[in-house]
Image (cartoon, rainbow, N blue to C red):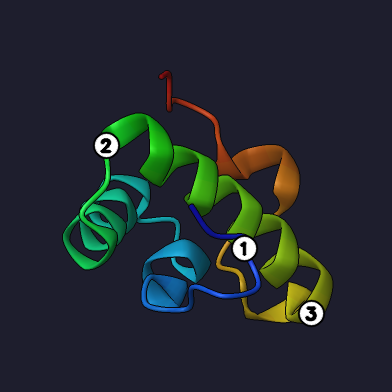
Amino acid sequence: MTDGAAVDVADEQILSSQIIRGLKTLRDHLGCSLHEALDVFAARYEVLRTERPSDFVCGPDEYWVGFYS
């Protein structure tokens, strides 16, 4: 499909911890399944955590709390 470095359309949702909106944005943009969107989202999350850690609204320990897939 694509790697996390290539898809930046959901960056604002990723940075602001809007996981569901980010997944929808990726699905709409890539025309992919939910599972594929989650893989791309997670890869992009890792890229952004490395490149822009101070831009996140919460720390890595809090980010995925309450999200179950």
Q: Position of residue 43 (x, y in %)?
A: 64, 52
Q: Nearer the viewer, residue 23 or 12?
A: 23
Q: Is residue 50 left or right of residue 59?
A: right
Q: Nearer the viewer, residue 31 or 41?
A: 31
Residue in view at x 37 percent, y 77 percent: 9
Among the two numbered marks 2 and 1 on one chain, the one whose residue lies closer to the N terminus: 1
Q: Position of residue 29 (x, y in %)?
A: 23, 67
Among the two numbered marks 3 and 2 on one chain, the one whose residue lies closer to the N terminus: 2
Q: Residues within 10 Å of mark 3 (few under 14, many from 20)?
A: few
Residue 33: image tag: 2
Circle 3/circle 2 CB separation < 8 Å? no
Question: Residue 33 appears in which quarter of the rendering?
Answer: top left
Above or below, comparing residue 40 to residue 55 in the picture:
above
* Disc 1 target residue: 4
* Disc 3 target residue: 51
Q: Residues within 10 Å of mark 2 (few under 14, many from 20)?
A: some
